[in-house]
Image: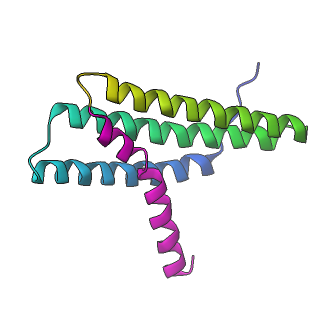
Amino acid sequence: MEREKQDPGILRELRKIAIGTAVLFGCMMAVYAAVGRFSLAVLIGGLMGSVYAVLNLYMLGRGVQKAVNCGDEQMARAGLRASYSLRMVCMLVVAVLAFAFPFAEGVPCLIALLFPRITIFVLQLAAKRTGA
């Protein structure tokens, strides 16, 4: 089977969101440190959530790209629904594991899962302000 070529637009946007997620992760770690609650478990939980959040967006982009390149609209819709379901199940697994593992904190993981949404919101606000 031929490997699909990755759309450079997906990677460009993913890079912006990954950078924003990393910045927010750093801010979260600084807040945990400032209030005296920083630990290795907090770091691991935050990393679990941050890494999966960016991976989730990559999988979303790949799924949309496959759907666009698919000739059949019904197949594209079914593929997007399956991709969404799989991504949400994986997100649930990551969150449950963060709470279940004794070496990880669940709350930082859950917070980190929101970082891409926050980053996208900030990027959209910045684009409106600059008129781009």
In the image, is residue 123 part of the stretch drawn in magenta? yes
Q: Residue at x 46, y 54 (%)?
A: 16
Residue 14: x and y in percent read 51, 48
In the image, is residue 20 part of the stretch drawn in magenta? no
Q: Residue at x 26, y 33 (%)?
A: 105
The quadrant of the rendering that contains the N terminus is top right
Above or below, 2 relative to 46: above
Residue 127: x and y in percent read 52, 73
Q: Quadrant of residue 70?
A: top right
Q: Is residue 71 visible?
A: no
Above or below, 103 relative to 9: above
Q: Main secondary structure of the magenta part?
A: helix
Give the magenta-colored segment's residue range: 105-132
Image check: 18 left or right of 9?
A: left
Extreme-left residue of the structure: 36
Q: Is residue 92 visible?
A: yes
Q: Quadrant of residue 63?
A: top right
- Could you say which is closer to the camera, residue 4 or residue 56? 56
Q: Residue at x 67, y 34 (%)?
A: 83
The quadrant of the rendering that contains the C terminus is bottom right
